[in-house]
Image (spheres, grey):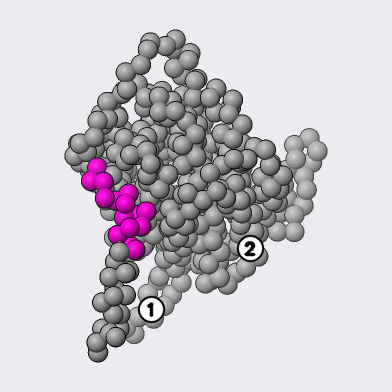
Amino acid sequence: MSRPGFPISKAKWGSLTNRVTASKLAKVLSYSDFRLLWFGAFLSFTGSHVMRVAQGYFVNELTHDEQKLAFVTFCGSIPVFFFGFFAGSMTDAFDKRKMLVLTTAIFAMGSLYLAVATQWNFVQYWQIVAVSLVLGAVSCVEMPTRQSIVSRVVPPEVLASAVPVNAMTFNVARIVGPVVGGILLANFGVPICYLIDGFSFTALIWAAYAIKSDLTPHPREPQPIWDLLFEGMRYTFRDRRLRTLFILEGFTAGVGIFYITLMPAYVTQVEGLGKTWVVEHGHRVLVDLAKQGIAQAYTAVGLGAFIGLLFATQASDSPYKATIIRGCMWTAAAGLGLISIVHIHWLTFVVFAAMGAATILQFNTTNALFQLLSPERLRGRVLSMHIWALNGLSPFGVLFFGWLAKVSRETGAVPLGPFGSVATPVGGVVLALQVGCVLMIGGALGATLSRRGLMGLA
């Protein structure tokens, strides 16, 4: 029996402690080099999400244009489309430690420049676009480098569990970062958010130097440059399972996650949050509710993503990965439809959380399968195909849906070139969400019917 004041008996507490210690999460975090990588990336990503809240708000206020808001994200991702599929060859060919330090330092310089530019009021929209374009090009190398380090700091038998735990860095940061970003944005403005992002990258640079594992490239026979650049692509498309995973992930990236970029416009257009007068201490004060609304919406997506990753960690040995991927795509489709018609503040956040859980679960299940289904000598190059599907195809979806939201809001119709235009009963972000829902249903249906392509995934 438990003693008064101790609601849990010692036996139960010991059992709970043993279960936590023996869990897959604890086993992965028992490797010191993995912990260094995890915490360095977490602090870096937290800074990035602080910046993202501020930049989304700032660009929306600066332009009041959904297409320009989407174009910033487009520029940050479009380099991955052109270079991402063979950037993994650099990951496999060069020292991963040096590559991670170099790319992270460039990220820091980009954010610090925008901190100075916004503080001294000489920032213009084109400068934000230019920085996004440069950092997008750098991310082509940084992402496969950082993700492929995971296979160097944990043994092969725990890699399937380590992949979703590693992805928690981004998604735990997606919970913490928007909260911190919303507070800083409301009280100190945009420049401090850029500044914190710039300094946060030092954590990942420190982690890269502190990791003791060998991150040098594996010895290999000389190859023709064409094979070096495109072998990862060929391997992916020759393997039926990898090819199917690539197509489904690319579809979700292009059609199912654009709403995150349009979140500032969603909060103001659909939820009607904006500047309003409130009475505080007997005085009328102008408060911008959109700042808190944007931060809360991003946090809801991040919280859902974190829950999804916990499930992914526990399901790393599940034989039902194909079912998980199909279910995630159906959930994303339903979510897009719901947030376009549900205007109840708390309920939209529940839907955002469900969508965050579904998409991150699909992406991380795919990530783990890409690493498990590829040989060590090609892992960086094959993994770059996963990154290309996720980040190289999404900018086109973001750009299209941003354009659709803008033209339908301004004209009440969608132009069809020489065929004239089609009047729409709804417009703006709502129309973009509903079109995305219809397209996502088509993708989910294709995943459901794709029996052979997802056969044998474990």
Is 21 in front, or is 88? 21
Q: Amino acid at mark 1?
A: Arg
How far is disc 1 from disc 2 in space, using C-alphas? 36 Å
Quick check: can you spot residue 457?
yes
Q: Is residue 261 left or right of residue 423?
A: left
Give x and y (percent) for residue 161.
Answer: 40, 48
Which of 345 and 254 lies nearest the eye of the viewer?
Answer: 254
Question: Mark 1 sits on what residue?
Answer: 284
Residue 326, above or below 350: above
Magenta segment: 19-33
Residue at 40%, 71% in the rendered image: 286
Quarter of the N terminus within the rendering: bottom left
**Left or right: 423, with 22 as reference point:** right
Judging from the image, what secondary structure is the residue with disc 2 in? helix
Is 156 displayed left or right of 448 in the figure? left
Characterize the local packing of mark 1: few (<14), some (14-19) or many (20 or more) Cα atoms within 10 angstroms.
few
Magenta stretch encompasses residue 106: no
Q: Which mark is residue 338?
A: 2
Query: How many C-alpha atoms fall within 10 Å of the one at disc 2: few (<14), some, or many (≥20)?
Result: some
For the point 44% across and 55% down, the residue is 314
Q: Residue at x 59, y 40 (%)?
A: 456
Residue shown at 44% from the left, 10% from the top: 224
Amino acid type, label 2: Leu
Image coords of residue 316 (percent x, y): 46, 49
Most prominent secondary structure in the magenta stretch?
helix
Residue found farthest to the bottom: 4
Between residue 336 and residue 18, name the one nearer to us: 18
